[in-house]
Image (cartoon, grey):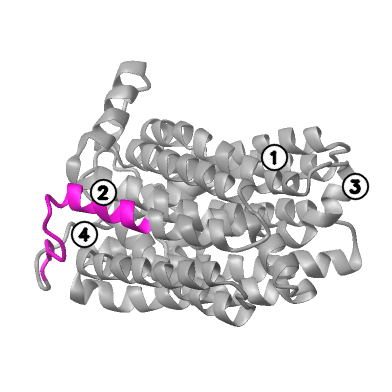
Amino acid sequence: MPTASRRLPPHQRSIHPAAFVALMALLMSLQALAIDAMLPALDEMAADLGTASPNDRQLVVGVFLMAAGAFSLIPGALADRFGRRPVLFAGLAFYGLMSLLCALAESFPAMLGARVLQALGSASLAVLPAAIVRDRFGGDRMARMLSTISVVFMLVPILAPSLGQLILLAASWRWIFVAMAMLAVIVGAWAWRALPETLNPAYRQKIEPRAILRNMAASVRVRGSVGYVFGSALVFGAMFGFINSAQQLVGEHFAMGESFPLVFAACAGSMAIASFTNSRIVERFGARRVSHTALFAFIAVSTAQVWFAFRGGETIWQFAPLMAANMALLGFVGANFGSIAMQPFAAIAGAASSVQAFLRMLLGALIGAGIGRAYDGTSRPLALALLVSGIVALGLVLFSERGRLFRRLTPPGAPRPAPNP
């Protein structure tokens, strides 16, 4: 006989914490899959679709990132009015359909157009998980939850290039997009059954241009938040630069060939390990202390990367460990910066998440595309970008914190905001 909870409609059910973490991670992962699964196929796609410049192949990734950032402004305001579930499922359906359209593309411009539309569907998958987490948690507990989600989420950058490589061994690159559509259906079916509506009815916002613009403007006017938003856009933009040029840099310059997915997985795996570690320590030490320390270490490692890149004769054994170290440090920066930036916006979490995702993704994608286009057959453009982004991000954090780093604003044992009903 079914239990009472199973007789309830989906929007009235609770969800087990472990299932909640896994589901949020998988929703976010669909966007990451659309970025990373492509990397081993870029050569074959470029040949089939007729691109002239070797660097043009990066547009398959870069255009998606920029469009995903631009479209991030849309789902948050809708989710603040209609709830998280309707907007989420609309995005999932559109993502799946546009993935199939990508599989049918017959020219490079058609592929780029389909990728823009696929990015539109993926925007809600990037924006809404953060809003849903903010609906349920606050303070350092939110940072811990985002870090735990990141542990599962980071399995996608580790596995996606290998998944793409496996598909290429048996079929054409078009089946990578078919696989994305199939995964959207599977994850969507689970979310439909398990995910409750988390928006507090008291926080529903009106769909009025003035109200939407007011909420969005409010989410970038708070000094304690804005430095973290732009700071994370800079450092993750440098990481996007690595993603854009990774196949050329690792596969061609460092001559790793078919071993490229393994090197990429090792670098991404370091971020997953760091995210897991962060989830275990952030409530003890605080999101600010952990992320500020990681940012200083990021600058130090980037300095070493610049030295090796410009010294000449750099090998994969020098490049990969330092790149993995910096990606690990981003595991301590990302979730904590995001949690700090979202903390002031419980009542407008959807709009705030949209604006912050828009700024992070669009600026990050533009920076990443610039780094990718500057690729000159060496790691020098990437190394310089990592160092400069870290230094400027530190300045932005100092602005938000009024020059006072390493503060603990949510001490251990302090009362924490209760989840919304």
4 or 2: mark nearer the eye? 2
3 or 1: mark nearer the eye? 3
> Where does the image place residue 192, in percent across and percent down from the top left?
55, 51
Residue 405 magenta-drawn?
yes
Q: Please report contact status of discs 3 and 4: CB closer than 8 Å, yes or no.
A: no
What residue do we see at 75% from left, 73% from top?
255
Label 1: few (<14), some (14–19) or many (≥20) C-alpha neighbours in 10 Å: many
Determine the image quadrant of residue 107. top right
Label 3: few (<14), some (14–19) or many (≥20) C-alpha neighbours in 10 Å: few
Which mark, residue 139? 4
Q: Which of the two discs, 3 and 1, labels the residue nearer the N terminus?
A: 3
Task: Find disc 2 in the rendering and name its residue.
Answer: 396
Q: Which residues are magenta?
A: 390-411
Mark 3–mark 4 distance (CA, rounded to whole Å): 49 Å
Mark 3–mark 2 distance (CA, rounded to whole Å): 44 Å
Q: Compare residues 89 and 222 and report the one nearer the observer.
A: 222
What residue do we see at 56% from left, 54% from top?
241
